[in-house]
Image: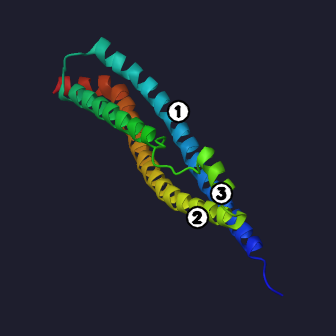
Amino acid sequence: MEEDPIKNYIELYELTKSGYADEMAGIRELEEKASRYLSVMGILLGVSSLGAKFIIDNFSSFQTWFDAAVNAILFMFLLLAFITTYSLFTIFKTSKLNHIPINQELVDFFSHHSYLDSIFALTRGIVDAVATNRIVRLEKIRRLSDSYILMICSIFLLALFTSALLARPFVNSIIASH
C-alpha cells in the first residue's frame, strides 16, 4: 500500500506548527519573568530613593571617609539598578522575531498553488520562523540571566548601603574619637 503524501505533509505541518507555538510560548515565559524582575527593580529603586533622600537631607557634605563610602555605595547601587532595568527592558524587544504573515499574499499563494505545495511552503516558512525565533529566545535567555545576576548584585549593594547607613552613627563616633 502506498503512503499518502498529503498526510505526510499535513503531519509535518502540524509538527512544525506545534514547534512554533512552543517556541513562542517559551519567549512569552521569558518576557513574563523579565516583567517580574522589573517589578522587583522598581521596588528596589523606590526603597533606595528613601535612602538617597535621607543622605541629601542629613549629610550632603562628607564629615568622614565613611560618609563618602556610604555615598559611593549608593551611587554604585543606583548605577547598577539602572543598568539592570535597561537590560531587562531589552528583553521585550521583538523586532527580530519571525512571525508567519497572515495577509492577502498568503491567501493568494494558497489560491494559486496546489494544496500540497501550499502546505509544504507554509511548513518551510514555519521551520524558518522556528529557527530564527530559537536564536532570539536563546539571546533573551542570556540577557535575562545577565539581568538576574545584575539584580542580585543590586540587592547586595542595597543591603550594604542600608547596613552602612545604620552603622554610620556608630562608625562616625569611633572615627571622631580617634
Q: Quadrant of the N terminus?
A: bottom right
Residue 89 placement: quadrant: top left
Mark 1 residue type: Ser
Vertical order, 63 against 22 (above or below)? above
- Three-letter code, disc 2: Arg
Q: Give coordinates of residue 63: x percent, y percent.
A: 18, 20
Q: Earlier in the sequence, mark 3 or mark 1?
A: 1
What amino acid type should be assigned to the residue bearing mark 3? His
- Look at the picture and state if 176 lies above or below 80: above
The residue sitting at 34% across, 26% down in the picture is 165
Q: Are marks 3 and 1 in contact (CB under 8 Å)?
A: no
Element carrying mark 1: helix
Q: Closer to the N terminus: mark 2 or mark 3?
A: 3
In this orientation, does residue 103 appear? no
Q: Which residue is more in the foreground, 111 or 131?
A: 111
Label 3 crowd (10 A; few <14 / some 14-19 / many >=20): few
Position of residue 72 measured from the top left corner of the image (x, y, whole percent): 25, 31
Mark 3, mark 1: which one is toward the viewer?
A: 3
Mark 2 = which residue?
A: 124
Identify the residue at horizontal 70%, vertical 67% (top origin). Answer: 116
Q: Residue furthest left?
A: 178
Quadrant of the rendered image containing residue 66: top left
Which residue was labeled with disc 1? 39
**Residue 30's x, y, as percent?**
55, 48
Asked which quadrant contains residue 162, the reply is: top left
Is any atom of residue 87 visible in this view?
A: yes
Q: Is residue 143 left or right of residue 109?
A: left
Label 2 and label 3: CA atoms lie apart by 17 Å
Residue receiving disc 3: 112
Q: Quadrant of the C terminus?
A: top left
